[in-house]
Image (cartoon, rainbow, N blue to C red):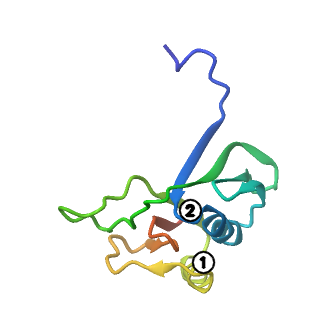
Amino acid sequence: MAGIRGFTSWVGVVLGSSDPVALARFYSALLGWELKTSDPTWVTMVMRDPEGRPTTSNLAFQLEETHVRPVWPGEPGTQQMQMHLDIGVHDLEPAVEDALALGAQLAEFQPQEDVRVLLDPDGHPFCLYIDR
């Protein structure tokens, strides 16, 4: 089988947050994508390709009133990261500077020279990496 029957090629990624509107605004500023729908419990963002065309994916943010910031790298007995975003860039250091200016935090542990692990305002790790 070459995948599930009826797959439309649409894939969405959802991040939980105690304030999904604020987290969506952070990612909108970070990625330059506009918000598509927004209410206090659910926000979606249109993902675009390098030419600005919408893709068959979206990034969404949902209310999780009991959201606990993950710890990265993981440690026994702490809230574990459920997923992270990898974001390709051409030049790492200016991209890191921009992310920090928007409210991201640089993680203490950096496992690779060509990748920078950052934390969004809710503590979700995301990686900026040189996209060759």
Q: Is residue 27 left or right of residue 104?
A: right
Instruction: Using the image, determine if residue 130 lies above or below residue 107.
Output: above
Residue at 44% across, 61% down: 67
In the picture as drawn, the residue positioned furthest to the left comes out as 76
Residue 87 - label: 2
| Nearer to the camera, 22 or 129 | 22
What is the x, y in percent for residue 1? 48, 13
Residue 10 - label: none
- Cα distance between the residues tagged 2 and 1: 10 Å
Q: Amino acid at mark 1?
A: Ala
Q: Is residue 49 left or right of residue 98?
A: right
Residue at 70% across, 72% down: 29
The answer, for residue 131, to whether it is visible in the render is no
Q: Amino acid at mark 2?
A: Ile
Q: Quadrant of the C terminus?
A: bottom right
Q: Which residue is mark 1?
A: 95
What is the x, y in percent for residue 94? 60, 83
Question: Circle 2 — which element?
Answer: strand
Residue at 46% across, 74% down: 118
